Image (tube, helix red, strand yellow):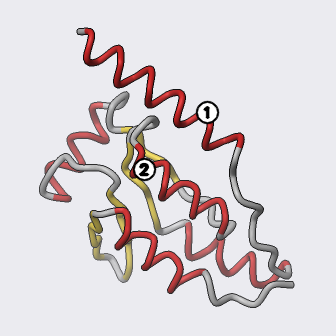
């Protein structure tokens, strides 16, 4: 009980700090941003709000100006079940990448960030 309160308190403080210290968003011309938005519509991040590794990924998403669906597995049992059944384990962050009717599940914040940078970081700023 006390551990959960501490973890949630610290996690919420980290999430608040993340919002206050976000890097500026990458700027793109409207056509390039539309392409990014289309590609991002096939992604979902399974995460906990206060998880430091999830915060790290969300900061990079913000910096890259990539808006994807955030699925909080701590508050939604359906998302937790999807993560377990389809991803193979309940571990966050996890990026679900849907391509050609197939879902790929990527764990580990550094791997997710590297993939995001490869997909969205090279788009020319407008």
Does residue 82 appear to the left or right of 115 in the view shown?
A: left
- Give percent across and percent down for residue 33: 75, 76
Residue that appears at 23% across and 9% down = 1
Residue that appears at 52% across and 36% down = 14
Residue that appears at 29% across and 68% down = 106
Q: For the residue carrying disc 2, how many other residues have a C-alpha within 10 Å: few (<14), some (14-19), or many (20+)?
A: many
Displayed quadrant of residue 40: bottom right
What residue is disc 1 on? 16
- Give percent across and percent down for residue 120: 59, 80
Q: Identify the mark nearer the N-term, 1 or 2.
A: 1
Foreground: 115 or 11? 11
- Quadrant of the frame with the C terminus: bottom right
What residue is disc 2 on? 54
- Give percent across and percent down for residue 95: 37, 62
Give the residue furthest to the top.
1
Give how far apart the Cα atoms at labels 1 and 2 are: 13 Å
- In the figure, 101 relative to 118: above or below? above
Does residue 72 appear to the left or right of 36 in the view shown?
A: left
């Amino acid at each position: 009980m006390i551990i959960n309160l501490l973890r949630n308190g610290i996690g919420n403080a980290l999430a608040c700090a993340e919002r206050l210290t976000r890097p500026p968003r990458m700027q793109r011309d409207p056509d390039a941003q539309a392409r990014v938005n289309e590609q991002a519509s096939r992604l979902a991040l399974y995460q906990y709000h206060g998880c430091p590794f999830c915060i790290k990924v969300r900061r990079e998403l913000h910096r890259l100006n990539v808006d994807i669906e955030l699925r909080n597995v701590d508050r939604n049992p359906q998302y937790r079940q999807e993560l377990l059944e389809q991803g193979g384990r309940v571990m966050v962050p996890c990026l679900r990448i849907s391509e050609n009717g197939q879902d790929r599940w990527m764990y580990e914040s550094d791997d997710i960030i590297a993939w995001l940078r490869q997909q969205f970081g090279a788009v020319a700023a407008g």
